[in-house]
Image (cartoon, rainbow, N blue to C red):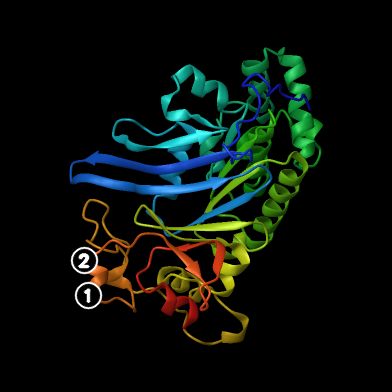
Amino acid sequence: MITVDKTAAGPEPREEDGSKRPLLEVRDLHVEFHTRDGVAKAVNGVNYAVSAGETLAVLGESGSGKSVTAQAVMGILDMPPGRITKGEILFQGQDMLKMSKEEHRKIRGARMAMIFQDALSSLNPVFTVGFQLGEMYRIHQGMSRKDAKVKAIELMERVKIPAARQRVNDYPHQFSGGMRQRIMIAMALALEPDLIIADEPTTALDVTVQAQVMDLLAELQREFHMGLILITHDLGVVADVADKIAVMYAGRIVETAPVHELYKRPAHPYTRGLLDSIPRLDQKGQELYAIKGLPPNLTRIPPGCAFHPRCPKAQDVCSADVPPLYQVTEADGTDLAGRASACHFWKETLHG
């Protein structure tokens, strides 16, 4: 593969104390959509960061704001009806919201790429996969069609598509769902970006193929030392690949934690509900747990904690005051690194 020159942006930005800045920082991001039914507040003050070589999993039910946040980061949010009303998106220290469209376009693909959840819809059915993979090289590096095709074959081999040389001239519909998703991964990797955002990359795939796709992503991330943001609603998918998790509900992050800490001891009732809903081998024959109720209408988010109408621990304060992201500590007051919970009663949830 050709190595992309990423030195044009200058030396890597650092904090005042000399430490390296995260690869990506999302700070107090707000996104809303103007609809016939009113203003839908899809993202309400999201903060997260991911460093080079690190995997951040963003979890939550459909409509929690996971994909909208990713689209805002990538600069592909439909505006209108969408509108970013507040916040910063810092990529290697530069605020992408202050960039021109041309500056943003140069970053997409070359330094930041996205894997979409529906590969069949994302790939153009009238062009061969080789043509579509080669387009990255033709547009960004001015390669000839012949040389771009050679690179497309290399990419297909890199993501372990059998008989890549013969299949480079096939069309998307001639591949299985798992192979199409590998093509999407290859497309994201074409210019060796620093950051990849994978939006539900295993949707509609069977369990065996899911595992293969996730193993491939983890292997490629280690090889290229990329930052990876993995968006999903399936906690089982991220258990073995994520370093840390951010749980979203109604456009807010309600809990952050290192992956194994969150699975072991959640500090938010919503996270506990998600974990309890995962089928377990030791509960054979028992009815599966489900969180009561439905996620809120984003045009009418409940006051206070948005989760309180569905929360088994809700009290009067929950319907009145919006909980901040509290620093989570042990019972003796020792800080738990990387842990935070937007729950007034996180102590009862964590230590109960």
Task: Where is residue 180? Give x, y as percent.
Answer: 64, 42
Amino acid marked by disc 1: Asp
Q: Residue at x 62, y 44 (%)?
A: 51
- Name the residue that disc number 1 marks: 316
Question: What is the tally of numbered marks visible in this picture?
Answer: 2
| Residue density around tag 1, few if under 14, some if 14–19, many if 20 or more, within 10 Å | few
In this rendered view, identify the residue nearer to me: 255 or 34. Answer: 255
Kindly check if marks 2 and 1 are in contact, taking CB atoms under 8 A apart as contact. Answer: yes
Q: Is residue 309 left or right of residue 148?
A: left
Q: Residue 18: percent from the left, percent from the top?
A: 63, 38
Q: Is residue 319 left or right of residue 45?
A: left
Disc 2/disc 1 C-alpha distance (Å): 7 Å
Say which residue label 2 marks: 320
Residue 35 position within the rendered picture, expressed as x and y whole percent measured from the top left:
22, 41
Give the camera-side residue of 234 and 315.
Answer: 315
Could you say which is closer to the camera, residue 120 or residue 48?
48
User: Dividing the picture into quarters, in which one does residue 61 lie?
Assistant: bottom left
